[in-house]
Image (spheres, rainbow, N blue to C red):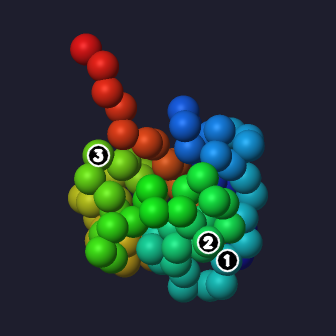
Amino acid sequence: MELELRFFATFREAVGQKTLHWRVEDGATVGDVLNALESEYDGLAGNLLDGGEVRPHVNILKNGREVVHLDGIETTLDEGDTVSVFPPVAGG
């Protein structure tokens, strides 16, 4: 199945583009996608996951909803879903 992945700020720089169309196996989870991204892009390696969970202050959204409010990295994905990946934000 195909997903749309959207990247923001430093993660966009690491991937080299704002949006990717990514093919995954049926039944794939958010964790599967994040693991694959860390393996594929050096700039993402170690920046998305920590100890089997989404790193603190990294926001992952499935169709606009935070996955921490769904099933975390076990959130299943469906054909056509959009996964948005936001790095930690600092400032003030």
Q: Amino acid at mark 2?
A: Ser
Q: Is residue 86 left or right of residue 82?
A: left
Give the alpha-carbon distance from disc 1 to disc 3, as whole Å. 26 Å
From the viewer's perspective, is the residue at label 2 or at label 1 nearer? Answer: 2
Q: Is residue 10 above or below residue 32?
A: above
Within-10-Å neighbours for mark 3: few <14, some 14–19, many 20+: few
Any mark on residue 57, and which? Answer: 3
Instruction: Give whichever of 28, 44 is nearer the camera.
Output: 44
Which of the two discs, 2 and 1, labels the residue nearer the N terminus?
A: 1
- Quarter of the image where the C terminus is located: top left
Q: Which residue is mark 1?
A: 24
Q: Which residue is mark 2?
A: 39
From the viewer's perspective, is the residue at label 1 or at label 3 nearer? Answer: 3
Residue drawn 47% across and 70% down? 30
Are the two marked residues, 1 and 3, in contact with CB atoms closer than 8 angstroms? no
Are the two marked residues, 2 and 1, in contact with CB atoms closer than 8 angstroms? no
Q: Can you give x and y, in whole percent of width and height, for residue 58 in the image?
A: 36, 49
- Quarter of the image where the N terminus is located: bottom right
Local SS, label 1: loop
Q: Is residue 77 visible?
A: no
Q: Can you give x and y, in whole percent of width and height, for residue 83 in the image?
A: 53, 55
